[in-house]
């Protein structure tokens, strides 16, 4: 039996509100995260991802409250990323209802964090979040970035993904900074390269703008497709995406 493709709305949260920009800049408010989460659950979303895009100490309590209130009303897996630096952070997020955590810059700074989280909570609780840009500086042509794509690291994106899986990451959330917010479609080359190396599920992110953009991402190797502003604005519903996938013979939940 074919494994069902998951459709995942992503809510970028700052100051307790959902925000969205283009290439992570010019952020604008798009609604209350708990209300939006409730709406996506009703529409048939398979999971939800929250990203705390400020992730400062001051905002951490706000984010915990958002996750807690969402988990009380929405009964699908919740992944929370942003500001996760220790296994205790993971424990606190799980305590308020998160099923999985996404880690990015903290793992780049201290890769053993991936081992620590996987050892304590299991690979199924650990998502490596990759913000990836095209770059001639790396062997693969893709470089890992931080700070919403504004800062390039020295890490080759494919090599880092491979290392993260070896350290215990149970999923890869692969976000194309080049495509993010453009609504021009996913970076299919990047998805395909990640699929070739990955022994864990790959979530495609960045660039969705129309129903017909999702099936090519799955055909390129994505196990799940993630989008943000097209859902928040009402331009697309979860059902629109699942119908488009079904039309291409792709199984969804």
Image: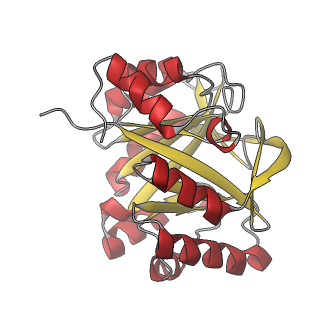
Q: x and y percent of residue 9 in the render?
A: 54, 46
Place residue 83 in its image quadrant: bottom right
In the image, what residue occupies the spot 83% across and 41% down? Answer: 25
Q: How many marks?
A: 0
In the image, what residue occupies the spot 48% across and 60% down? Answer: 79
Q: Residue furthest right?
A: 26
- Above/below status of 207 relative to 247: below
Residue 50 seen in this snapshot: no
Q: x and y percent of residue 51 in the render?
A: 63, 57
Pick the quarter of the image with the C terminus: top left
In the image, what residue occupies the spot 50% across and 17% down? Answer: 212
Pick the quarter of the image with the N terminus: top left
Position of 219 with respect to 17 (left or right) is left
Q: How is the image coloured?
A: secondary structure
Position of 175 with respect to 167 (left or right) is right
- Above/below status of 111 relative to 215: below
Q: Residue furthest left?
A: 1
In the image, what residue occupies the spot 66% across and 61% down? Answer: 33
In-front residue for pair 241/26: 241
Q: x and y percent of residue 114 in the render?
A: 44, 62
- Above/below status of 250 relative to 234: above
Position of 17 with respect to 242 (left or right) is right
Residue 242 seen in this snapshot: yes
Position of 212 with respect to 147 (left or right) is left
In-front residue for pair 20/243: 243
Q: x and y percent of residue 229 in the render?
A: 68, 39
């Amino acid at each position: 039996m074919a494994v069902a493709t998951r459709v995942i709305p992503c809510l970028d949260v700052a100051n307790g509100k959902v925000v969205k920009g283009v290439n992570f800049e010019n952020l604008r408010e798009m609604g209350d995260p708990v209300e939006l989460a409730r709406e996506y659950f009703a529409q048939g979303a398979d999971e939800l991802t929250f990203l705390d895009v400020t992730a400062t100490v001051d905002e951490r309590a706000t984010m915990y409250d958002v996750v807690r209130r969402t988990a009380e009303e929405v009964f699908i897996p919740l992944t929370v990323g942003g500001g996760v630096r220790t296994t205790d952070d993971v424990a606190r997020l799980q305590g308020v209802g998160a099923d999985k955590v996404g880690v990015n810059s903290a793992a780049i700074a201290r890769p053993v964090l991936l081992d620590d989280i996987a050892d304590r909570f299991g690979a199924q609780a650990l998502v490596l979040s990759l913000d990836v840009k095209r770059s001639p500086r790396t062997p693969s042509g893709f470089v890992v970035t931080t700070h919403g794509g504004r800062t390039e690291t020295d890490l080759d994106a494919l090599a880092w993904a491979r290392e993260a899986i070896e350290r215990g990451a149970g999923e890869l959330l692969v976000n194309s900074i080049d495509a993010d917010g453009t609504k021009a479609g996913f970076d299919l080359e990047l998805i395909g390269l990640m699929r070739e190396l990955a022994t864990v599920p790959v979530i495609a992110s960045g660039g969705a703008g129309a129903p017909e953009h999702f099936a090519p991402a799955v055909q390129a190797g994505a196990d799940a497709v993630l989008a943000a502003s097209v859902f928040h604005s009402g331009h697309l519903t979860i059902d629109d995406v699942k119908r488009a996938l079904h039309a291409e013979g792709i199984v969804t939940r």
